Every structure is written in structure tokens, then in C-alpha cells.
Amino acid sequence: MSEPEDDPVLQNALQHAQAVQYDNYAFRAIPGGWVVHNLDFEHLWAGTSAGRCNPDGVKRLYLSVEKETAQAEFEYYATQDGVDPDLAECYSFAAKVKFERVLDLTSKAVRKQVGISLREIEADWKGKPHQPSQLQLIGYWVSKGYGKFSAILYPARRRQAGKNIVIFKECLTRGDYVTPVSRKPTKGWP
């Protein structure tokens, strides 16, 4: 992906957006058998493909705030791939996470501050590779250091009242951490 054009309005909004601290656990469920079971947690940091909160080329790590949300994400994507989630092998990671500055898009006031609606967050982002969504642009500028955020907390689309968090490793600051409960995924939840 080529770098988006500067967006002074969005960049300024991010510089002045309210941050929250986040100190809790986060979760990820992944499909697969023997190969996945042998992955280390560190492999999850390698993702650079486009996601709900980032255009292609941005390093990030997606986790869910609740185990149930991580499971709902797994089930959705398994179904999208034509696999019955009840029959698919599933492994999970849990991590203790702490961030000093998180952009909390679950907050209506913060969404208003950065110019994005709940509808835009929940919209389908796939199929528009040359036109990043507003949420992907927010993630892009956060990943470039605007607002000095380490992560974005946002409403999950796959589970009502669920939340996901996307973490930008290059934006982690002193005091921030992502510590896996186990380096290897577990069958079921730890």
C-alpha cells in the first residue's frame, strides 16, 4: 500500500484525543492443528495484512478483551472459510497487557473527537484495498505515532458488547507490555 496523503484534521484530532489506560488480559483464538500448536506467541506480531483497524503493510497484533469475543471472532472466520467451527481445531493465547495510552473508540465522545461513527467502525472493510476505511486511516496514523497511542480499543463486530484491541508494537512505550500467559497456544483457554 502506498502511504495515505496527510490528513491534518485527523492527525490533529489524534494528537488531542483523550487516552485511557488499559491493564487487563487479552485473548486470541486461532485455527489449526499440529503446526499452529507449535507456534510461539511472538509469531502473532508478524501480521501486516490489512485488518479492520489498519491498511495493508502496518505491523499490528489483534486481540480480544474477552475470551468469548475471541471465540466469536474464530467462529466467524472459520465459517467464512467454509469450516464448521464446532469441528475445527482451535488453539488460544492469553496475554497480560498494560498500556498507558489507548485510543478508546468504545467511547462515543472519543469517536466524535476523531470523527468516526459506530456504524463506520462496524462496516465491512473488505473489498476496498485501494481505499482505506476511516478506521484503517485512524490505525495507520496511530501506528505512525500520532497521539502517542500504543493501541486502539474498539467495539467488536462479531459479539454484541464485546471489545477488541489492536496493538502497534513499534508504538509501545516504557511501562507498556504484552506478556503471554504461555509462549505456546493452548487447546481451549488457559
Image (cartoon, grey):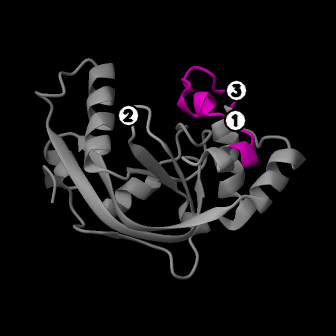
Residue drawn at 17 percent across, 22 percent down: 84
Image height of 124 relative to 19, above or below: above
Q: Looking at numbered disc 3 in the image, what kind of residue is underneath it?
A: His
Provide the major secondary structure of the magenta segment.
loop
In the picture provided, is 3 more to the left or to the right than 49? Answer: right
- Examine the image and state in which quarter residue 87 appears: top left
- Residue marked by disc 2: 160
Q: What are the residue bounds of the magenta stretch?
A: 112-132
Residue at (47%, 52%) from the top-left corner?
165
Give the residue at mark 3.
130
- Rendered residue at 63%/26% (across/down): 129
Residue at the image point whose x is 64% and y is 48% from the top: 139
N-terminal label among 1 and 2: 1
Q: Amino acid at mark 1?
A: Gln
Give the CA distance from mark 3 to mark 2: 29 Å
**Quarter holding residue 185:** bottom left
